[in-house]
Image (cartoon, rainbow, N blue to C red):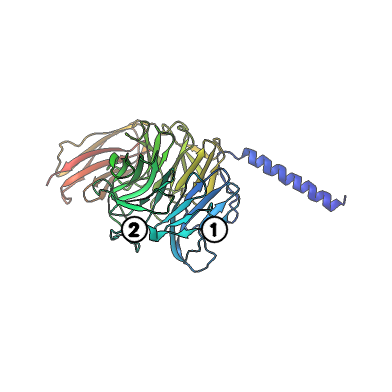
Amino acid sequence: MPINKIKLVILSLILQLAYLNNAHSQVGWRYLPNVGLDTPYVRFEDVYFTDTSNGYAVYINYFTMTDSSQKPIYKTRDGGNSWTKVGPAIYGSNALRCIEFLGDRVTGVVGSLSGSIYRTTDTGNTWTDISAAIDDTVSTDDFYVGSKHICGWAHAGNTFYGVGWWGATVARLYKSTDKGVTWTTKYLDTSLATGLVDAVFISADTGFVTGGHNVSAGFFVSPSDESVILKTTDGGNTWTKVFSDTTLGGRIWKIQMLDRMNFVASIEAYYYPDSVNMIKSVDGGNTWTIIHAGSTTDSAIAWDCITQGIGFATPRIGWLGGYYKGLFQTTDGGATWDTVHFGTTFNRFFVIDSTHVFAGGGMVYKWAGHLSKVDVKDVSRPLKPAHILYPVSPNPARGMVKIEFDILTETNVVLQVVNIDARQHTTVTRGRFKPGHYSYYWDSDNMPGGHYMIWLNNDQIPISRRFVLEK
C-alpha cells in the first residue's frame, strides 16, 4: 500500500477514535450537527418530533423574504443531524410560532403570529395555507395586521386545538375535530384570560391552556398583571381558572404533562423578569405550587432575561430556559437547581421519553439521556425562604412606610416597592448584604393610593408582602 494511502487510513482511524471518545465523554446536553438548518434571527420557536428520527422546527423571521427558496419549516429524518427546508415558500415577514402533529404522524399544522396557518397531510413534505378555513370575527387590537395569531397547539385523537396569542386582549381557542379540515373559533371570557400561549389536552374533553390576564398589547412591551392556567372538561366550551398569580405577574408560558397527575409549567414573570420560576401540580392540574429556581442577568439578546421554556425528562429531572444564556437544571423535582452553561434563548422542550429530549432555542439541541456535571455551577436553592420580610405596619399605610427584613446568610438583595394598580416600580435599595436586621423607609408622599407590594429579591427565594397605601 502506498505510504500516502497508509497515512490517510491512519489519520482516518485517529479521527474516528477521537470522535468516539468525544461522543462517549459528551454527556448532558449537546449540539446537533444541524446540517442545512439556518441560524435564526432570534431563535427556533418550536420543535416537534413524531419519533426519535423524524422531527420539525420553525422560527420567526422579522425580515422581509423575497427569495422563493425561503421555506422556514424544516424537517429532519435523522434525529437532527441534517435538515431539509419544506414548503411552502413564504414571502414577506413571517412569524411562524408553533407546530403540531397528530398521532398518525402524517397530519400536522403550523401556526404563526402573522395570521397564516398551514397544514400538511404527507409528513410535512408539502404544506397548504388553510387560513381561510378559520373564522375570526373579533377585530384585532394588537400590532400585527389581521387576526388568527396562534402561539401554541395541542391535540387529542383527531382534534387540533390552537390558542393565542400572548399579547392579545381577547383570548382565542381554535378547534378542529376532523384533522384540520374545518375549524371553530371560541373567544374566552375576558374575566379569566385575555391572551393565551400554550395548551395541553389529556383527552378530547379535558385540557389546560396557559396565558395571562389584563394584557396590554404592544410589541415586546405587553405586560400582564396576572399569570393564569385555565381548565376545561367539555372540550373548550367552558373554562375554570385553576391557577392565578399577581405577585410575579406576566404569563404562564409553556406547559408539559408528565402523566395524568403530574404537570409543570413556566412563568414569564413581568414584574421581575430576571426571576426564574416554574409551577408544579401533582393532583392532575387542579392545584399548583410556585417553585423559584434562581435569577439571571445574562441576557442573550437586547431585551429582558425572561424565562419561557420548560421541559422535564422525568418527574425529577428537568430544565428551565429563556431569553438568556444557559439552563437551570433540577434533579430532584425542583427542590434544588444548578445552572448549566449550554445553549441560549430556550423556548420549547420536546420530550419523547425519558432519554430523548430535544429543545428549540438559538439552535436545535438534544439531551443525551443522562446527566452531566461538566460546565455546571452549583447554585442550589432551598424551597423555604432563607430570609425574613416583615409585614408592613400599620396596613393600610401612609407617609413614610417602614420596611424591615432579616438577612440570615450573605446574599445579593434588591428591595423594591411595586404599585400593582399602575405597574410602577421603585427600587429602595440593592447590594450585597451580610446577615443582620435591616430597616428602610419608603417615602410615599408622591405616590397614588392603591394596592402595593414589597418585593425582597435575593439569591435564594424572593419574598413579597402586600399592603394598601391610603391617601
Mark 1 burial class by Cα count in 10 Å: few <14, some 14-19, many 20+: some
Tell me the distance, in whole angstroms, between the alpha carbons under discs 2 and 1.
26 Å
Q: Which amino acid does label 2 sit on?
A: Asp
Q: Which sits earlier in the primary sequence, circle 2 or circle 1?
A: 1
| Front residue of 150 and 323 | 150
User: Which label was assigned to residue 182?
Assistant: none
- What is the x, y in percent for residue 65? 48, 66
Q: Is residue 357 or residue 397 the one in the foreground?
A: 357
- Is residue 149 rendered to the left or right of residue 29? left
Residue 240 figure quarter: top left
Task: Using the image, determine if residue 152 lies above or below residue 286.
Answer: below
Q: In the image, what residue occupies the spot 39% across and 42% down? A: 200
Q: Residue furthest bottom?
A: 66
Q: Nearer the viewer, mark 2 or mark 1?
A: 2
Q: Return the x and y of residue 386 as percentages of the image width and height.
A: 34, 31
Q: Which amino acid does label 1 sit on?
A: Val
Dot 2 crowding, Cα within 10 Å, few <14, some 14–19, many 20+:
some
Which corner quadrant of the image does residue 205 belong to?
top left
Element assignment for label 2: loop
Pointer 2 residue: 135
Give the farthest residue toward the right: 1
The x, y position of residue 264, in whole percent, is 40, 38
Indicate the position of residue 242 as horizontal and vertical percent values: 30, 38
Which residue is tagged 1?
Answer: 86
Tally of numbered discs: 2
Q: Which residue is drawn at 47% across and 59% down?
A: 128
User: In this view of the protein, which residue sits in the foreground, 313 or 87?
Assistant: 87
User: Quick one: SS at disc 1?
Assistant: strand
Can residue 410 be seen? no
Say whether residue 186 is visible: yes
